[in-house]
Each structure stands twice: as structure tokens, then as C-alpha cells.
Amino acid sequence: MACSSAVKPFSPDEAHRLIHQLQQPAVFLNMTKDWPVLQWTAQHLSQCLKEKLIRFRLGKKEETNDPLFETQCSFVNVTLGQFLRWAEGKEGEEVGVFRDFPKTEYWAYADYKYIAEVFEDQPSKFEDVKWCDFGFEDRGGRESTLWIGTEAANTPCHLDSYGCNLVLQVQGRKRWHLFPPEDTCKLYPTRIPYEESSVFSRVKVLNPDLNRFKDFQGARAHCVTLLPGQVLFVPRHWWHYVESVDPVTVSVNSWIELDVDNEARISEAVTKAVVCAFKTSPSEDNMDDWLNPTEAGVSSHSENMQYLNLALRSVTQKHPSFSSKCLPHLSTKRNYTGHILTPSSPLSPPFGPHLVPVHCQLPFDSTSTTIKACECARKCAKMCRKTEEEMGKPKGAEQGGSVVDLGAEKAGLERDREEENEDVKWVSVSTNDLLDCLVHPEVIKRVTELLIQRHAGDRRTALD
């Protein structure tokens, strides 16, 4: 693939080294000005794709404390022309099946659309995306993914199990809220809904329930609004919640495979085996829609164990060229070319006008108002309760009074103890609660280490 000849602030080799060395999210500027993909506005794509149907996810605009996962969304297949007319506020037959979803109540998102499939009849469009400017010679549109959405369209907060991420903003703006891997416990990870390669957060980042998720207040948010032409680098295992800011947004991304992904595939295989075993066992509390729409279906335990053994073999036999192609079920959502980043000499990132770090923001801007409101609400409730109790006391029971109603005082103390114990009432453990513990990233990490040790030891014994 031919790279552009225009002078860039970083050469392909320099950009490649930076991507490997960066330990925090950063935005590359002035690297894509001559990329043809910057012409890929929704209007342009509509003209290119004409009557081709694109699958959109529709989410209800609701003020709740729970994330809106894909299992709770509606899906429609429409042309981009119908999407654009709906985004403009039009109704009726000219917006197709969008007519059943009022724009005032819903947002729409065409996410994870493989460009290789979108433009399967126009392969020349693959050349419009030039990741070779970042040191990835054989990576272009064929290895990239397209995202088209309306204002408020969002991706639930999650981390990607594999690789790192390069994201080019093409049209409109997107707001990214990122959290470091060290804050995983504060994000309350879950694998329900299950999607291979994605660990979701149970916290709704922009409107968190701080009574249920108290530790989220300590999560270190790194926030940035990505503008057209800018490229965001998302390091490995950084949590991210992404929302569209403008009426229509378009972006293109590519996941870059890392050498540590081999061990991550073992972890994902273990997770899938455990989740499938539990969620395919019917019980009264186990009837939810647990499989994400991105998954092709539920594989058998035998198949899951086969995948696990393939992943283990790749690591213990030290095959550095192993790629996700060896494990078909582990490539459902991410496109890889087998290009693996390898260690290089330490490098101090040249932050400046062409490379901008995404800084930590404490308190988290998007939730600070909510946090303060929740704290005030709790304080107000406590004060009101105290005032009501004092107003209900007999006149002589006030401190310093001559009359003391010992019965009322005792009843008040018992009531206080009951209120203090309200939050510790027994709640039964559900299947999903148990799974959240069993497949917690820290637990799965340790299980992976034990499996590698065991498998390597058994292999040495067999060789002896």
C-alpha cells in the first residue's frame, strides 16, 4: 500500500514507535490531512453505497442509572439515505423502518461495520485509509471498521481484551471518556452481556448510581473531544465510553494486534467456557438475554475446550507468529493482519502541537455534578430525618428538659439501629453475581497463569 508523500510531523517509523511506547491515550494531529477517507461524510457514503442496507442499532433516550447494552437495543436495516433523512427529522415512508422510531426518543448507531464488507463491491475504497502513515504498511480500509451515528449515540463503557486502538474522526465530534486498566475494580466489570473480546462496565458513566457503585467516584477519567482529522490512540486495556456530540458523526478505526494477545486469548477462551456453561443451564434467575448480538451463537463445551487448548498450545510452544486466524471464534469482532508490535528502546513521547496527551480530569467532569447531587441528597435526607424525629419528641424530652421519656428514647435508638442496618439486609446471590466474581479480569488473569504453568509443566514431563 502506497503511503502519502506529504510531509508529516512524524515519519511512519516514528509514529510506530510512539504507538508502542505511549502508556496513556493521546491524540495525533496533522497526520491525515491528505487521506481520501476524510471525504467519507455520511452524505458521501450514501452516494457511494446507494441502496445498500446498513444495520443500525437504536437506543432509547432515557435518564436511567443503568448502561444501555446492545441486548436492550432495537436493530433496523436501512439505506444511508433513509438514515440521513431520519437524522434531519423527516418522518413517514421516506425514512423506511425508521418511521417506527421517533428521532426525539431514539438515537441511531451503525457500529462495528467492517469496511471490507461495506465496500465489498468497491475494493478500491480500501486505499482511502492509510494506516501506513503510522508504520503499518499493509493496513488500510480492509483492516478497518466504520462507525456512523447520530447525536447521543454511544458505546457502553468497556475495555477491549485484545490489542490497542487507532481511531480517526471523519465527520462531527465524539467525546471519549477513558479510564486506566488500574481502575478496573472501580468500573465494576461484567461479562454479561457476553461478547468475545469485550469486558463491560456495570456503571453508567454519565449518570452513575453511586449508592451501588461507590468506588467509581475514585476512577480517574481521561476525557477528550475528538475532532475531524484527528487520530486517537487508545492503549491496551483502557476502559472507554464513547458518545457522539454532533447531529451526525463518522469515524474509522483499526485494532492493532499485540504480542501479549496470545495470553489474552487463553483468558477469553476460559471466560467463554465458564459463561456458556453457566448461562446455558436454565434456572429461575437465569433467563436473561445474555448473548450480545455481535456473537454468532452459543458454542458447545467441547468446542470451547478445543479453543482453549489451541490457545494454550500457542503460548506454551512459543509460537510468536500465532494469530487469531488459528481460533475462528476469537476473531468475531476485531480485524487483525497478524502484524505484532515488538518491544523497542524507551522513548519519551514528544508531546506538543502534533501529539497531545489525554489528561486525567479529577473530579470526573461528566459525573461531578451527579456525585455532588447524590452527596447533597444523602445529607438532606439525613437532616430531614433528624428534624422529623426532633419534631416528634415530647416537649420535655429535649436535651436539658425536666422530663425524659425513656420509652421513646429507647424506641428511637432501636429505630436508628434498624436504619443503620437497612443496607446490610441479605440479598440472594444470582447466577450473574456469581459469574461477575468467577470471570472477573483479575481472577481470569490468575487462572490463565495457572493454566500456562500447568500446561508447560505437563509438556516438559511428556518430553522427558
Image (cartoon, helix red, strand yellow):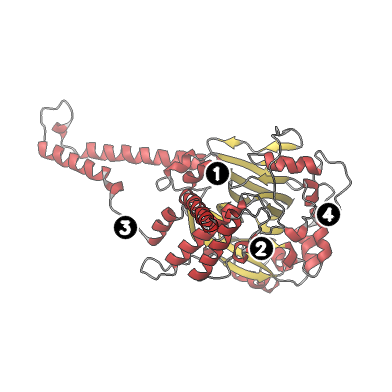
Residue found farthest to the right: 5
| Residue 337, percent from left and from top | 72, 57
Query: Residue 387: which disc?
Result: none
Mark 3 / mark 4, whichever is N-terminal: 4
- The amino acid beneath tag 1 is Pro
- The amino acid beneath tag 4 is Pro
Residue found farthest to the top: 400
SS for tag 3? loop
Residue found farthest to the front: 464
User: Within 10 Å of the Cα at label 2, are there few (<14), some (14-19), or many (20+) other Cα atoms?
Assistant: few
Q: CA distance from mark 4 to mark 2?
A: 30 Å
Mark 3 / mark 2, whichever is N-terminal: 2
SS for tag 4? helix
Mark 4 / mark 2, whichever is N-terminal: 4
Q: Which residue is mark 4?
A: 36
Q: CA distance from mark 2 to mark 1?
A: 27 Å
SS for tag 2? helix
Q: Which residue is mark 2?
A: 325
Regarding residue 274, the answer to whether it shows in the image is yes
Regarding residue 61, the answer to whether it shows in the image is no
| Residue 172, percent from left and from top | 72, 51
Q: CA distance from mark 3 to mark 2?
A: 42 Å
Looking at the rendered image, the disc whose residue lies closer to the viewer, 3 or 2, is: 2
- The amino acid beneath tag 3 is Ser
